[in-house]
Amino acid sequence: MTEQPAISFKAVRADLPSASGVAINGKVDVAAVPALERALEAAIETTADGFVVDLSGVEFMDSSGLLAMLNARGLLAREARALAVVCPAGPVRRLLEVAGVSELLVVCDSREDAEAALS
């Protein structure tokens, strides 16, 4: 049996023309959440406009990743800042829908849709 390569986690700044943001790639599980939270908090604290989290490169997210997203929403809400989440159809989008948080977040299919939602 061939061993599958580990799915890595990566968070990088990925601003839109009208909003700051972070793009997440790989696997978001309990092991990756501390790095995710640091990346989100740092980007939120150093910006002042709308914010986008791009999950289009996320292959897997568990409930701890979902909680990190809700915490980011809370940080932004304290300053009345908008949050858009880029999350195309797939397993991560289903997680957002099943957990009921797609109603709390502005979930968009693409970065272009997020740009329009935040403008």
Image (cartoon, rainbow, N blue to C red):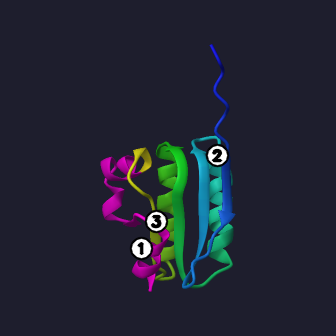
Residue that label 1 marks: 113
- Residue 85, numbered circle: 3
- Residue 45, numbered circle: none
On screen, residue 3 versus residue 59, left or right, reads: right
Quadrant location, the N terminus: top right
The mark that comes first in sequence, 1 or 2, is 2
Residue 47 lies, in percent from the top left, at: 64, 81
Mark 3 falls on what kind of element?
Answer: strand
Q: Of all residues shown, which one is farthest toward the top?
A: 1
Which residue corresponds to the image point at 67% horizontal and 34% vertical from the top-left? Answer: 6
Q: Nearer the viewer, mark 2 or mark 3?
A: 3
Question: Visible in this render: residue 16?
Answer: yes
Which residue corresponds to the image point at 53% horizontal and 44% vertical from the top-left? Answer: 59
Mark 1 vs mark 2, CA separation in Å: 27 Å
Quadrant location, the C terminus: bottom left
The mark that comes first in sequence, 3 or 1, is 3
On screen, residue 103 versus residue 26, left or right, reads: left
User: Does the magenta-highlighted stretch encompass residue 117?
Assistant: yes
Q: Nearer the viewer, residue 111 or 85?
A: 111
Residue that label 2 marks: 32
The span picked out in magenta is 93-119
Magenta: predominant secondary structure element? helix
Residue 30 lies, in percent from the top left, at: 59, 41
